[in-house]
Each structure stands twice: as C-alpha cells, then as structure tokens.
Amino acid sequence: MVNRERLVNIVLALILPALAFIASGMGEPFYITLATRIAILALAAVGLNLALGLGGLVSFGHAAFFGIGGYVAGIFATHAFNQIPLLSSPFVIMATNQMPVIWIVSAIVAGLVAFLIGLISLRTSGVYFIMITLAFAQMIYYFAISWPAYGGEDGLSITIRNGFPGVNTLAPLNFFLIAYALLLLALFAFARLRDSRFGAALQATRQNEVRVASIGIRPLRIRLVAFILSGMITAIAGALFADLNRFVGPSMLSWSMSGELIVLIILGGTGRLFGPVAGAILFVLFEFALGGLTEHWQLFLGLILLAVVLFGRGGLVGLLAGKVRHG
Amino acid sequence: MLLELAKVETFYGASQALFGVDLAMAEGEVVALMGRNGMGKTTTIRSIFGLSPLRHGTIRFAGNDISATKPYRIARLGLGLVPEGRRCFPNLTVAENLLASARSGFWTIKEVNTLFPRLAERSSQYANSLSGGEQQMLAVGRALMTNPKLIVLDEATEGLAPVIRQEIWKAIAALKQQGQSILVVDKTLSELLPVADRCVILERGRNVWNGLPGELTSEIQDRYLGV
C-alpha cells in the first residue's frame, strides 16, 4: 500500500516538469504557464493541507494568506520599479525585487497574521472556526479594496516580474522551475513534519482533544503552530501567483479563493502528501478543458466534487493508491 | 509523598460523585484502587488528571498543587494515564501513537517494543486495526512514552482474554521491579493483589478501607467488593 502511494507520488511529481519541458520543446509557452499555475496552486494547497489535512482545521480563510503573499510581491515590485522607498521615516527602507526576500517577507507577514487569527479562531471549533477564519479573510479583503494606494478594487499590476539571483525569471521555463522547486521543498517539509513528533501530536489532536491533553500536549499550542506554518507556505505561493500573473488584486483574497484551495485538497486527497498536487492538476485541467467548452464549468466541478465526497473520500490519491487514513 | 489527595470532592453538574477522598502514595509504591462499580474510582482518576475539576479539597503531585491545573500541564508534571477502554488514537499507526506522546527519558519506542514485542510487529498498523489486548498494550506504551513519575491504569485488563491479561500483568510487574510508581484499578483481585503494595477501597465517593493486600480479609471483600 505504502509502496503504491510512493509510486503514485513519483508519477504526480514528474507530470509537471514533463508538461513544462515538452511544452518548452514544442515552443508552447502557454502550457508552461499552465504547469506553473498548477505548481503554485499545489504549493498553496500544501500549506492548507498542513492545517486541514493533518490538523483537521477547516480554514475557510486561507485566501488571506495567499493574498498577503500576492500583495507583498506586488507592493515590492511597484516600489522597486518606481524606486520609491517602502518606508521613508524614521529610516529609509528601499524595496527589492528579489524573490527570496519577497518570499521571506510574505511568510513573516502571513505568519504574524496567522498568529493573530489563530489565537482567536482556534479557541473555537467546527462551524465557528470556519466562520471566524472566513470573517478575518473578508476583513482583509475589504481592507485591500479600500486601500487606494495599492490599486484598491482594481488591484496592482507588476510591470516586470520580480527577479531571482542568477536566473532570468521572465523565461517561462525558468519561472516554472522556481515554482516547482519551492513546491518540492514544501512537500519535503510537509513529509518531515508529518512524520515527526509534532505531526503525530497534531494528528492525534485532530482525533481527540481530551486524550491528547492527558499525554501532556496542549491542543491550542500545537494547532496554532500548524496554522502559522500553514499560512506561511500559502503566502509564499501567493507571492509566486502574483508574479505569474504579473498582477495582484482583491480576488486573490476573496472567499472563493479559500474555497478553491479546500476543493483542491478534497479532490486530491485530504491529508495525503501529494493530495494537493493531484488536486491542483485536476482543478486546472477541468478549468482548462471544461472552461473551453462552457463558462459554467464549475457546475461540472461541483458534480465531481460531490462524487469524490460521497464515494471516494481519499480523493484522486486515494483512488490510485488506496485508502489509508482519515477519520 | 508523590501523590496526595486531601478531602477531594468532585461533582458532575449538580450530582456529587466524590465526598472527600483522601489518598496518599509514596514514590515506588503500587497502589490498588478498589471498589464496586460507580463508587468513584474513575472519577478519582479523572480528578487527579484535571479532567473532572474538583470543587473542594486539594491534590498535590510531586510537590505541586495540581487541584486547578490544566490536564496537559498535569501530564507534563509526570502523570501518565491509561484510560478506561483503551482509548488510543484510532487513525494513527502504532508508531505514531507512541511518537505523539514521546517525552525524553528512559522510555523510548524501542523500550516499549521490548516490553510489548507484539507492538513492534504491529508498528505500522493503525490502532483501530489492533485487537483489544494490543490496544491496551499500546495505551500502556503511550502513557510510558511520556516517561511518567506515576502511571495510572484505569481498568488495566477489563474485557481482555486471560492470556492477554497475563501479559499485561507481567508488564505491570516488570514496571514495578523497575521502581515505577503505579496506581491501578482492576476487578480481578487474584491478579491485582500480588502486584499491589497497598489497597484503597472506595465506597460511595469516600475511602472506607486502606491497608496491605494481606489484610484484605474475605469479610472486607464481601462487604466492599462483592457484587
């Protein structure tokens, strides 16, 4: 069973670079962008999978972190392009257009926001947790809309994609490889975390809070750490997403974005290492294939989601590799 | 004293379950907590672990007043619980169950596997696929992984096959040999008494008898433990 899942994982890991390299060889940059989009959405979902899959925390507000990452990328790009300092008093901070710095800043900002949201929302559970995370995300959404300095409702265009030391990020294949490398890194971190004591305790917390307390684990603390790490990973994906589209707008913060990330995970396999990757592949494929036929493609997505929830709760990975966990 | 309960009174809502339980045990002691069903054994244990907060009285453990301490802090002070009904984490593997509660000390997954070789064989199996006896071994192992100063077993062998019961008692005896302090509840006196240093009997939320296993005459047994 485990070996079969490993095989499925390897195939899933290879699909994206295969798509990108073949498209590159055929001179079809559109498909490279498609592969990049999948990798970035998968990365965002790996972040959410930490909270939702391992911790059982159904966060309906992860768009907040995705959007925060996007806005950090957009704001940095704009300031760097126009050579306007981010902060002029009491001391001057110049913006940079270097991605690694942007990722770190995204992760830190999202981590702080996740800390605050988590501190309040994690005291509740079930539907209240879902609603509170949604409420916080909506607050940030409306804040972005009413913030004219950074485009308000219109969003913010990124004139030149942010850079990476020694790499021309404007070449689609290069940018894909950056996103893909980060995805692999996040998957590696997820796997290590899941197999650690922290991961076992987090999953135990999902299954029974009282039992967990009686072995000396404080549920709130462990969930908060998971929620923060989860938000940080999703924020880095958001920064990449803004750079991919060369645009960041309030839509990245909208509740439907949060919903999409949840849908991705359920489609792919909740709590499974490569669930987010499988889910992102399916989602973007549907969007691309069905979206070409009808603009109501989400209707079909809804039907498929229904089927997955009713009949195959392990998602695509569960279907291919067999059901393992969850309850 | 390692553990000291003084005049503990615990309520479930409006109904009182404990009416002033006193209990003291020293380090290295094995104490059997006895009494018929519904006399307050489990409630006493829940009170010790902060799962059923007490309304009056005090509980001290290893020099700390834990009367109003949160359960996870109590566990961290060195109290390990094997709850009634072998409650493991069903959708974690045996190894993950053990890993989740690991705290540094003598007990590691390796040591637990030595104590219960069956768990080593089942290491990657989910807890809900284990037999009752194996789940109880896992529950004991999980509590040991916290490296407790005192391990509390509520209904150590209830509902298990005789062969499995023997294995559990053998493990408890081995723990006692190592100097582990143990508070244990069980109904099978013939197996419980040989490992116990001392017995405490509860009746209607009060302790009514305290003594050595050898002093537990059949008269006392009939009076407090007979069904």
Image (cartoon, coloured by chain):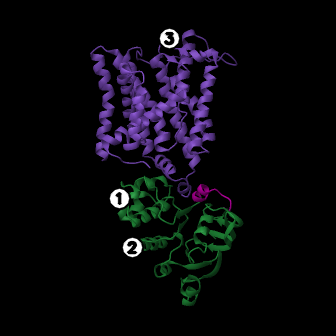
**What amino acid does circle 2 point to?**
Ala
Kind of residue at disc 3: Thr
Question: Is B218 placed above or below A145 here?
Answer: below
| Circle 2 crowding by C-alpha within 10 Å: few under 14, some 14–19, many from 20 | few
Report helix, strand or loop for mark 2: loop
* Residue B122: image tag: 1
Chain for mark 3?
Answer: A
Residue B106 shown left or right of residue B77 in the figure: left
Q: Which residue is mark 3?
A: A159
Q: Colour of chain B?
A: green
Q: In this image, B67 relative to A105: left or right? A: right
Which residue in the protein does label 2 denote? B161
Q: Which residues are magenta?
A: B66-76
Q: Identify the residue shown where x is 55% and y is 58%.
A: A214
Q: How many marks?
A: 3
Closer-to-camera residue (A97/B18)? B18
Q: Residue at x 69, y 65 (%)?
A: B14
Question: Which residue is more in the foreground, A50 or B74?
Answer: A50
